[in-house]
Amino acid sequence: MFDVIAQGDGPLFMDPDPDKAREFFRTKKRAMANKLMTVREAVEKFVHDGEYLAIGGFGANRIPTAICHEIVRQRKKNLIFAGHTSTHDFQILAAGEVFDRCDIAYIIGLEARGLSPNARRYMESGKVTVCEWTNYAMALRLKAAAMGVSFVPGRNIMGTDTFKHSAVKVVQCPFTGKKMALYPALWPDVAAIHVHEADVFGNCRIRGISIADLELARAAKHLIITCERLVHNEEIRSDPTQTVIPYFLVDAVCEVPFGSYPGNMPYEYYSDEEHLKKWLQVETDPEEFRKFLDEQIYGTKDFNEYLELNGGIERINQLRAQEHLIELD
């Protein structure tokens, strides 16, 4: 048994017991069945009030924006959120106040674009209970869950204020006598990941960096996939080495072309910096922001209507050209 040398005072929102997780995964259906459904159907079926939600992607890259919108549109509440490399996805979910607990690694900021005024107001309102981590720490927590163990050791975070407000425990390594930080496993109730291609069964291809999404896919109890394109299973079988998320991890497949907008989709389209700037500007006035949300999310029936409101395929083509460095006339 390890002797705990020090531990953070942050709350642990999810039980890291691997045997309890196995009780769920033992009964999870893993059939190679057609899982195609709409975003609305997927959120209705797999996202429930009070559950733990994790979102894939990194920053504004390859985020499942359509899922975030639908969670807000359906007015989900009291979720726990994994604030892991979260930018515009966090901004959307904070706008709907869908979560009241948050594991914080990177939130509120939209990287070089600045801070989200509304997300900052929400996090400073006292409505959200938090536990602090680092991005690497959150990745290790997902890795532990993917491995089916209750924790994995690491050497970052120790000696920081982040450690003080985390749920990390520091122990003495039984092999070397050195101090090691132990990161508890994290099994989200539901996760959403946006990918480049998928078949109807859930076999997925991702181009570019995957960050912690491969571990997230294996850690999540339920997994919703949104994809730029549906491809035939014969295409998947023609080059199986490109499949990074296999079908048996997936519960829902939603075809959502341009589904990361206004974020960036590597090799597909660039982020809409003008639209992201508009979000940041309108958030400075809470009343104007409420009107903006009514127009952009609550007043639209789905993500396609949101795209049309913001330039539709003409704007997407401009962003595609920007991603590929093509000059338009």
Image (spheres, rainbow, N blue to C red):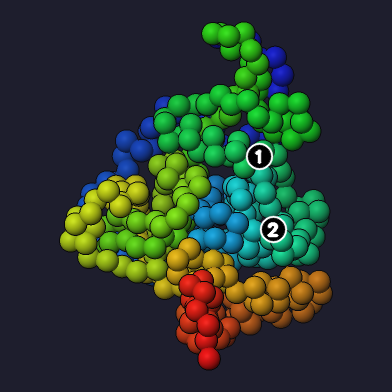
The vertical placement of 260 against 78, above or below, is below
CA gap, disc 1 and disc 2: 15 Å
The vertical placement of 151 against 224, above or below, is above
Query: What residue is rendered at 38% in x and 32% in y?
Result: 22
Query: What residue is rendered at 71% in x and 77% in y?
Result: 278
Q: Amino acid at mark 2?
A: Glu
Q: Amino acid at mark 1?
A: Thr
Residue 326 numbered tag: none
Residue behind mark 2: 111
Q: Earlier in the sequence, mark 1 or mark 2?
A: 2
Q: Is residue 301 left or right of residue 197?
A: right
* Residue 195: x %, y % from top left: 41, 60
Query: What residue is rendered at 54% in x and 66% in y?
Result: 264
Q: Is residue 157 left or right of residue 252?
A: right
Front-lying residue, 38 or 127? 38
Residue behind mark 1: 134
Element assignment for label 2: helix
Tag in front: 1 or 2: 2
* Residue 318: x %, y % from top left: 53, 82
